[in-house]
Structure formats: C-alpha cells, structure tokens
Amino acid sequence: MILLGVRFYLTTLPTASLELADVSEYEKKVDSLKRIAARKKDTIYPFNPNYINDFRAYQIGLDEAQLLRLSRFRESGKFINSPAQFQQVTEVSDQWLDSIAPYFKFPDWVNNPRPSYSKNLSFADKKITASNLNTASQEQLKAVFGIGPALSTRIIEQRQKLNGFVDMQQVREIYGLSDSTMIQLRKHFFITPPAGFKKIVLNKATRDELSSIPYFNDYLVDKLIEQRTLRDGFKSWDNVMLTSRFPQEKLPLIQLYLTLD
C-alpha cells in the first residue's frame, strides 16, 4: 500500500514546462547560417567570359542556347574581348548584360593595350621584314627589343617541345614574355605551321594521334577514348571538358590541334 501511495503521489506532481526560449536561440543560429550559405551561393567572382562551363552558365543565368552560341564561337578559335561582343555572340538581353558584365575579367592586354612608341622616329622609320618564327635563329630573336639570351632560349626550347609553333597563342604562354615584347615579336615574326600539319578529328582519332598532342598525357588520352566510347562520340567541347583531369585552361591551345568533326 505504501508503494502504491508513493507511485500515485509521483504521478500527481506537475511536470516542468517546455522552455521555448532555448529553441528560439537555436532557430536564430540556424537562420543566420542559412543566410550566410545563401550569400556564398549567390556570390559571383570575376571571371573570363571566354571560359564559361556548365556550372558557371547556370550560376549567371546563361541558358543552353546562349552557351551553345558561345561554344561555337570559341571553337572557331576566336576570343571575346568586350561585353558588347559577348552580347553580339550569345544574344543575351541588355538587362542580363548590365547585371553580369561588371564581373567580366579580360586579360590586361585587352583592357590596357600598351602604347606604341612611334615618336622615336629612328625606330618608327625602320623597315621590318617579318620572318617565320619556326625557322628563326636565336640571334634573330635577340634582335627584337625586349628579348635577351634567356628569353630567346626559352622560345626555342618551347618550339622544339611542340615540334614547331602552330599559332602565336603558344608563344604567349612562354614565361617572361611581356605584352609589349609580344607586340614587337608579332611585328618581326609570323608563324607557318610545320609541313604536313593538320588538325586531328577527336571523334575519329587513334590513341597514337591523341598522344601526339603536346598538352595530353597517357592518362588523359585513355580517359578521352573512354568518354568518347560511352558518349558515342563527343557532341560539343563542353562534353570533352567533363573528361577527368582535362586541362580546361588549355582548351584554346588544344583546339589548335583538335576538331570534333
């Protein structure tokens, strides 16, 4: 009877009320974290509009048709150099351009072209006979203002590594070559691709042909062939860039050697 009485007494005791103050504090913290996450998700960092992948297109609101126009333009080997040109190629609206164009980041030589020093009459009046960069000697290279022994050696070493330059874009990649020196180099030299050079068709290329491309290694070649088989051929460069370890920043250079069809 005593035990029953004690049990009955315990059941009649009032229970502690739920403290909602603590829950509200947790809710404030959760809401704060959600706001921070939303800000991070919506943040757009400066980017070069010549290299827009699927994720970037989704982030900035570029639809599939507009991205396809941009991809076709880039596949032709050309570059976007201004917001107006970007709108002309992609056909985006004025409202879209006004909101996204401030995030465009073009190379310094596009935004701030170096002035030419034509006031120096002795230099301006000097006639320049351009020659093929693929056959130029080190002495010819050093004759260009801004190119010394070290830089001329690097140019020749890169030329040998590539088995001859195909386009001036490849020369621009050489370490130590400034924009002003590049301008002078273009005045003195042109590039004629090596004899017998022709682009390789990616969707038909053999493993040996892909391995001959300077910017590919064995791993990438295997993955490209694997993805090409799975996709029954690449339909666009966007598909190609999804390949594991594909060097997207080298795409313009790779397109000098490859074509989809």
Image (spheres, rainbow, N blue to C red):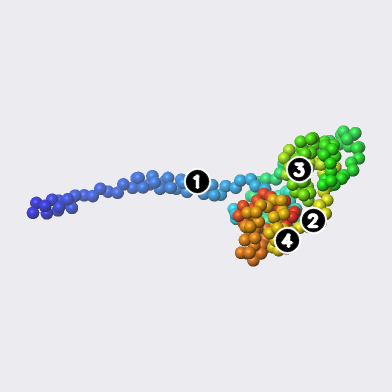
Q: Does 164 sit left or right of 90 as displayed? A: right
Q: From the viewer's perspective, is the residue at label 1 or at label 4 nearer?
A: 4
User: Disc 2 residue type?
Assistant: Phe
Confirm whether residue 129 shows in the render. yes
**Which kind of residue does numbered mark 1 sit on?**
Ile
Tell us which disc is closer to us: 1 or 2.
Answer: 2
Which element carries disc 2, helix, strand or loop? loop
* Mark earlier in primary sequence (1, 4): 1
In front: 136, or 102? Answer: 136
Q: First in sequence, mark 3 or 1: give its number.
A: 1
| Residue under numbered circle 2 | 197
Residue 36, label in figure: 1
Q: Earlier in the sequence, mark 4 or mark 3?
A: 3
Q: What residue did someone put label 4 on?
A: 201
Q: Position of residue 199 (x, y in %)?
A: 76, 58
Distance of label 4 from label 3 (alpha carbons):
28 Å
Amino acid type of the residue that numbered disc 3 sits on in the rendered structure: Glu
Q: Which quarter of the image is occupied by the C terminus?
A: bottom right
Q: Residues within 10 Å of mark 1 (few under 14, many from 20)?
A: few
Cα gap from disc 2 to disc 3, whole angstroms: 20 Å
**Does the image show residue 110?**
no
Contact, mark 3 vs mark 1 (Cβ under 8 Å): no
| Residue 144, x across and y down, in percent | 83, 38
- Where residue 88 sits, quadrant-wise, is bottom right
